[in-house]
Image (cartoon, grey):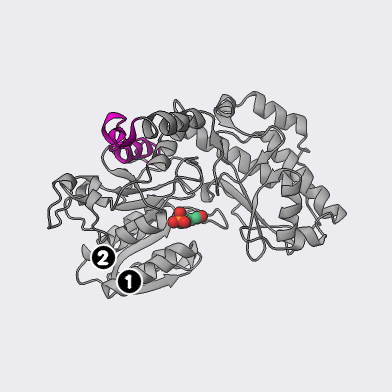
Amino acid sequence: MTSTITRDACAALDAADTLAHCRARFNLPADTIYLDGNSLGAMPANVPARMKQALEQEWAHGLIRSWNDADWYPAPQRTGDKIAKLIGAGQGEVIVADSTSVNLFKVLVAATRMQPGRRVILAERTNFPTDVYIAGSAAEMTGCELRCVDPDDVLAAIDETVAIVSLTHVNYKTGKRYDMEAVTRRAHEAGALIVWDLCHTAGAMPVQLNACEADFAVGCGYKYLNGGPGAPAFVFVASRHLAAIRQPLTGWHGHAKPFEFTHDYAPHPAIDRMLTGTAPQLGVIALESALDAFDGVDLNTLREKSVALGNLFIALADQELAGLGCGLASPRDADQRGSQVSLTHEEGYAIMQALIARNVIGDFRAPDILRFGFAPLYVRYVDIWDTIAALKDIIATGAWNTPEFRTRKSVT
Ligand SMILES: Cc1ncc(COP(=O)(O)O)c(C=O)c1O
């Protein structure tokens, strides 16, 4: 017989949590439980002071001199190097630029160019839509076919016709994750290159891009990296590919010598060749300082806490929500999960709105998914208890069933 989990037991887990001190590195409203760091990360407490300096001294006073004097120009490279440490990449293999969508386009076209004679981009049907849309355009422009298969069929679908395998490591709806090493190995055995989207991975759990011999990766700065709304994204190119990769958006910041203003394009020899135009500098500065929240954090400990939070959420859902119409949309096995747990409920949208009205913030993904993301740096075990308790009350009392909660907003 399993014993009942109590709130006191959750508080005891918080008391023993070796990452508990990291919560003070964020500005979180005291009355709010935030389980949406997989969509927009919380604001690190050091960012406002850094932005104030960037605005009032570097921009207002330094003006254009700050590109040199405040070291603005190399910020995308510096920030990329910080992110590299979180994803098992080397220094000089990651740079911050553009959005995930744009970086994916650049990488897919570039990778396809490296695979003459192969004309298939293999992706999967349940991927985040932007990944599929972008892969479709990249395929059309390079004369390739986009082949989308079900997630469980990916390994079997990798054959000698495939140029590129393009996958998201952790699925945005279910939180299910791929075995990066096994899939990368299979792609290489078949002579394909692999592109990993790390949007739901970077900052939530360690991955070892280089140990897996991954070729390319992209990911966003505003989820678990906490870079702020619309933060610039990152792109990884394994150093063995740097000399050969030719990305299609050949803007001047990717040029070998941008300030010589030459007529002909010559790609920068280093990761800088993945740049296009001028960086959204304030966004890069915010992301760069936000990454300090990871200082001294052991990524294996981060993963252990993420797994423990997810397991607790599932155990409490089993214990408290039985008979209330909820299903589990995420794998029970933590080895197959990222850092989120998704529930299903046919009234999921209204239930999530009712939860948010109680300052318990997750999000909803159509048609029926309630998503809860666990950012291990600031989510507490008692937050899980309190979320499930609120969910139980909202569903059991029908508190979700009001016109206000049923009306769809533009962003879910
Ligand atoms: C897997 C994945 N890729 C890409 C994106 C978004 O890309 P962008 O930042 O270009 O909007 C998301 C956003 O949630 C995502 O989950």
Q: Is residue 392 magenta?
A: no
- For residue 210, above or below residue 47: below
- Residue lying farthest to the right in this orientation: 397
- For residue 29, above or below residue 132: above
Q: Is residue 163 left or right of residue 31?
A: left
- Count of number-bearing discs: 2
Callout 2 amino acid: Thr
Residue marked by disc 1: 139
**Dot 1 or dot 2, earlier in sequence:** 2
Q: Mark 1 touching mark 2, by CB under 8 A?
A: yes
Crowdedness of circle 1 by 10 Å Cα count: few (<14), some, many (20+)?
Answer: many
Q: Is residue 212 left or right of residue 116?
A: right
Helix, strand or loop under label 1: helix
Task: Identify which residue is drawn at 80% across, 56% down.
Answer: 400
Q: Is residue 314 left or right of residue 52?
A: right
Q: Is residue 63 magenta?
A: yes
Q: Position of residue 397 (x, y in %)?
A: 87, 53
Crowdedness of circle 2 by 10 Å Cα count: few (<14), some, many (20+)?
Answer: many
Q: Quadrant of the C terminus?
A: bottom right
Q: Position of residue 312 (x, y in %)?
A: 67, 41
Looking at the rendering, the stretch of residues picked out in magenta corresponds to 62-87
The reply to whether residue 354 is visible in this rendering is: yes
Residue marked by disc 2: 112
Q: Quadrant of the N terminus?
A: top right
Helix, strand or loop under label 2: helix
**Res 139 → quadrant:** bottom left
Task: Identify which residue is drawn at 76% across, 33% down.
Answer: 7
Callout 1 amino acid: Ala
Task: Identify which residue is drawn at 32% across, 30% down.
Answer: 70
